[in-house]
Amino acid sequence: MLTVRTMRPDDFDEVADLIFLSTNSWYQQNQGVQAFPGKPEDCRLFCDVYEDLDPEGGLVVVDERRELIVGSCFIHPRETHVSLGILNVHPLAFGSGVAKKLLDEIREMATSRQLPLRLVSSALNLDSYSLYNRAGFIPIQTYQDMKLSVPARGIPEEEKDLPSVREADLADLMSLGQIEFEVSGISREKDYCYFLENSSGLWQTLVSEDENGEVDGFLVSIDHPAIRMIGPGAIRSAASFEALLRAQLDRFRGKSVTFVVPADQPEVTRIGYDLGARNCELHFGQVIGEAQPIQGISIPSFLPESA
Ligand SMILES: CC(C)(COP(=O)(O)OP(=O)(O)OC[C@H]1O[C@@H](n2cnc3c(N)ncnc32)[C@H](O)[C@@H]1OP(=O)(O)O)[C@@H](O)C(=O)NCCC(=O)NCCS
């Protein structure tokens, strides 16, 4: 028998193993790549970050007969929408309706709050795409994942007059919310506070400023063995994106890092190519419910999941 219940802190180690096993085995089997190259315990990061953001926000599916957690996901309701974080099913249970069971619960939660439900899903993983598409999700933005090995000496500087960039602080909170609302029609104060407070030391949040000294974009990054990623962000212009990206890349000297950019904005993808980045995946920003067309540059992230 399969039971859905709230994830508890004493489940976190088992859920970390599940995230590692499920994701790696799907990608190994279908694409011949290892999604998480490190250790299973690295994936505990997902449980810890989501617990910090939304205590008791996770769900698990328990196979009572096997005494095994066979499904997990994370839900983060925000002022404008509900987001769905990484969803995993145990390889032993692939194709037996576990993901659909979780998704049914989450859809009900979003419906009861009368909020759109949003996520970022792989366009190359048809099991995941089909799961969400059958549930009513509609792709609103195509993204390409770009991977870059940052030289140990950093990215060479260019003779370019780019907007100025600085480290964000709590006084920028309102600006972050305003810009993301303008660009994507979403706002999530709790997430911005979390990035800016940065009690774990894993995050870096930068803002760009226009010629009047007004904040016109922000870009966050995380550096952890489970995930080295630049994003989320919301930015008004390609020049500010380039300035923010270059400044974030500096943090990853000697490491490989991923950033995810809108595929329909050639001036943005060109910046990635010119820096030497390679495409490594495709993703869709998906929604059930209302969503405004993107007005600017939206950079999603997989932790916390946003688009
Ligand atoms: C993607 C994943 C979550 C799916 O979980 P699952 O429990 O196997 O999915 P379900 O059994 O609930 O089935 C999903 C639905 O998609 C359907 N489906 C799958 N492939 C399909 C296809 N090519 N065309 C149409 N429908 C398809 C299934 O028939 C099912 O619908 P139904 O229940 O109405 O018949 C699972 O493969 C997994 O954990 N993968 C690794 C991690 C991952 O990719 N996570 C997702 C993104 S974070």
Image (cartoon, rainbow, N blue to C red):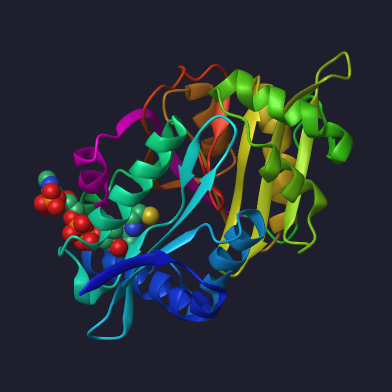
Ligand 1 location (quadrant): bottom left
Splitting the image into 4 quarters, where does residue 213 fall?
top right
Is 103 positioned to the left or the right of 201 in the image? left
Residue 211: in sight, yes or no?
A: yes
**Which sits in the foreground, 155 or 83?**
83
Residue 61 % position (x, y):
33, 68
**In the displayed image of the protein, which residue is found farthest to the bottom?**
66
Is 138 positioned to the left or the right of 126 in the image? right
**Which sits in the foreground, 110 or 239?**
110
**In the displayed image of the protein, which residue is found farthest to the left?**
96
Q: Is residue 146 magenta?
A: yes
Residue 34 % position (x, y):
38, 69
Splitting the image into 4 quarters, where does residue 31 fall?
bottom left
Q: Does 138 appear above or below 301?
A: above
The residue sitting at 61% across, 44% down in the picture is 231
Q: Does 200 appear above or below 247?
A: below
Splitting the image into 4 quarters, where does residue 184 fall?
top right
Residue 7 % position (x, y):
47, 68
Residue 197 % position (x, y):
81, 51
Which range of residues does the magenta coloring cover? Answer: 128-149
The N terminus: image quadrant: bottom left
